[in-house]
Image (tube, helix red, strand yellow):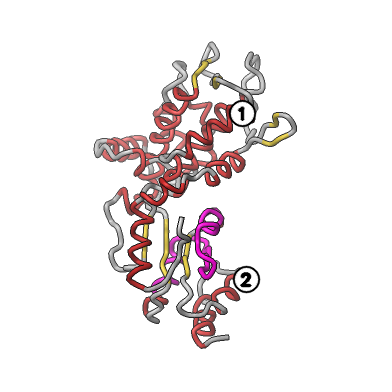
Amino acid sequence: MTVRGKILMQHVTQLDGLNELRLHRKIAYAKYPRPILLVEGAYDKWFWQPLVSEQALVISVNNRNHVLDVLQWMDEQTARATLAVIDADVPMIQFAIDEEYATLFLYDAHNLETWLLMSPAASALLERVREDVGIGELVYRSPAMEQVLRLTISEAITLLWEWSYTLGLYRAVSAMNKWNFRLRRINLIAIIQSDGRTIDTERLTRVFIENSGQRKLTEKMVNDAVDQLRQKRLTNHVIVNGHDWMNALVNVFLRQAWDETLVKPPIDGWSTLDFRDRSFDQTWAETILRTSVDLDWLNRTTLVKNIRTWEYANGCQLLKNH
């Protein structure tokens, strides 16, 4: 084990939550100047792994704070062959991008999934939905709706962006104010109004407060914060969390595609449905999205261009030549 490896291991073991012995071992045996890419989660690693060169190492460090801790320490040790890619989410919304680390890069959107949804991969995903699920239109009905709503895929995509934008505003004000809103507990179908296209924000606000556990939080406080952020007219790529978009695709549209008559509303809690003995859940949809990336598009993104500039400045190759 190199001296650098031993020091890295000593540092990493001091970080709360870094309980993966494999992570320690991989960092310990990484020889300088082998390029290292630090990412937040396992899905980020899964996306980047096929894109990096053979000598490069991709390490998932579980969350943003741990990424910054490791990156800060490595900067102090002049480990110039290390960079990190993290979600833009709140830093982009608050225009508070951390300039301290020259080796800290952000996705060109809220997170990895949002970034890819703004690429040709989104169309590829919907084509797979058309082929594998076998539907040319998407249908659904919320409890507030009297009739089934039938949409073309392009119409459904427009709705998915609108819904996830609204949810993104609530996510953002929660993160900015530390209100601890748990969006995973939201049953999106239950808060869609009778027109089938609009989220009932009054109901969403009440659910927001219930889920936050903040006793002093009022509807006025939440609505004022959301309205103030909405007035900034931030774009989809800033506000929308790609997981919300994908969750809406699966749990509003795909889980109801099994029965176009929709005699009964879907059962709360369903997250998976089967067609032709296959499971079409959010994991399936996000996997298709990540594997449908267009390399020409990828090479044109600001993120990849910045990484290429970093490679040139540091005399190493992190990404393959595509």
> Could you tell me residue 278's position as x and y percent?
71, 35
> Could you tell me residue 133's position as x and y percent?
63, 28
Q: Going by the picture, which residue comes out furthest to the front?
A: 321
Q: Residue at x 49, y 20 (%)?
A: 152
Question: Is residue 49 within the magenta segment?
Answer: yes
The three-letter amino acid code for the residue at tag 2 is Arg
Task: Please tell me which of labels 2 and 1 falls first in the chain.
Answer: 2
Q: Going by the picture, which residue comes out furthest to the right?
A: 277
Residue holding disc 1:
131
Q: Residue at x 64, y 35 (%)?
A: 280
Residue 201 sits in quarter: top left
Residue 233 sits in quarter: top left
* Viewer-proximal residue among 37 and 305: 305
Which mark is nearer the camera, 2 or 1?
1
Residue holding disc 2:
22
Q: Reply above or below: 147 against 211.
A: above
Q: Does dot 2 land on a helix, a strand or a loop? A: helix
Q: Residue at x 66, y 23 (%)?
A: 258
Is 144 left, or right, of 216 in this rendering?
right
Quadrant where the N terminus lies? bottom right
Question: Is residue 56 within the magenta segment?
Answer: yes
* Magenta stretch: helix, strand or loop mostly: helix
Magenta span covers which residues?
43-72
Q: Reply above or below: 224 against 303.
A: above
Q: Going by the picture, which residue comes out furthest to the bottom?
A: 3
The three-letter amino acid code for the residue at tag 1 is Glu
Q: Reply above or below: 295 against 117.
A: below
Q: Reply above or below: 13 against 83.
A: below
Q: Marks 2 and 1, how far apart in space? A: 39 Å
Q: Does dot 1 land on a helix, a strand or a loop? A: helix
> Could you tell me residue 308's position as x and y percent?
37, 62
